[in-house]
Amino acid sequence: MHADERKPFRNILILIGGILLCWELAYLVVGDVALRSPWQTVAFLGKLMETDLFWPHFSESMRAFAVALAIAIVLGLLIGFALALHRLSGEAMEPMLVALYSIPKITLYPIILLAFGLGISAKIAFGAIHGIIPVALFTLTAVRSTKPILIKTGRVMKLSPAVMVRSILFPAAVPEIFTGIRVGFSLTLVGTVLGEMFASQRGLGYLLMNAISLYNVDVIMSVTFLLVLMAAGVNTLLLAIDHRLHHGV
């Protein structure tokens, strides 16, 4: 492994060490009233994962998140490519997508509940709406940035829109599209957990909200730590793949 390839991993280790140190210092200042130390949190999380209470909530969250992410990616790609292939529609709709992206999604949750009711469907829908627009916007930008000669070649060859996307546009736009998927992953996870916190009886979000109402600091710290650990771990992997796609190394 070259020095340039080791540098991101070294930076990650330094970041993790710094976070743990700040966490421990904050615990020493605040005490057990509102915090637990990193070591106490890890120990309690291990005990929590051994109980029958934890895994049904975990599996519910992961199932809802996986479906929401799949929907966000598929719809985001379809919207992005459709708008990119029709220039006028793309120019008209892009500002609307940006405006929708800036709206706090929590304001839409009552509408989601009315449409889907209480249950996993509402969590999936709420998670998906967080991820669709970033994927669509990154896809739209990526296709627009494709070299004009590639598009002209496809038109000269009289390729259909589907073949044009599959053979020319998608391969050329993969790096930027993957960046959009990486952003969509994080936002979809946030949306799914938020959906569970406000109107659900299962999932990690529900477990977290229930712990907040009972002021159970151990559960709050452990579930939060697990969610951060999952998001950071997967994002580190996606970021490494993203770097390779953009730099070809």
Image (cartoon, rainbow, N blue to C red):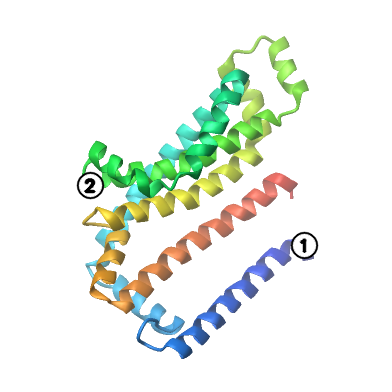
> Which is in the foreground here, disc 2 or disc 1?
2
Q: Give the mark nearer the N terminus: 2 vs 1.
A: 1
Whether residue 28 sits left or right of residue 137 in the image: it is left
Gap in Å between the C-alphas at discs 2 and 1? Answer: 47 Å
The answer to which quarter of the image holds residue 214 is bottom left
The reply to whether the C-beta atoms of the residues labelled 2 and 1 are less than 8 Å apart is no
Image quadrant holding the N terminus, namely bottom right
Percent from the top left, x then y, of residue 52? 22, 68
Q: Is residue 208 above or below residue 89?
A: below
Q: Nearer the viewer, residue 141 or 150?
A: 141
Q: Is residue 106 above or below residue 163?
A: below
* Residue at 31 percent of width and 66 percent of height: 208
Percent from the top left, x then y, of residue 220? 34, 72
* Residue at 61 percent of width and 25 percent of height: 91
- Looking at the rendered structure, the kind of residue marked 2 is Gly
Q: Is residue 141 above or below residue 184?
A: above
- Mark linked to residue 119: 2
Secondary structure at badge 1 equals helix
The answer to which quarter of the image holds residue 54 is bottom left
Q: Is residue 201 above or below residue 173?
A: below
- Mark linked to residue 153: none
Percent from the top left, x then y, of residue 190? 42, 54
- Looking at the rendered structure, the kind of residue marked 1 is Asp
Task: Find disc 1 in the rendering and name its residue.
Answer: 4
Secondary structure at badge 2 equals loop
Crowdedness near tag 1: few (<14), some (14–19) or many (≥20) residues, C-alpha within 10 Å:
few
Crowdedness near tag 2: few (<14), some (14–19) or many (≥20) residues, C-alpha within 10 Å:
some
Q: Nearer the viewer, residue 241 or 200?
A: 200
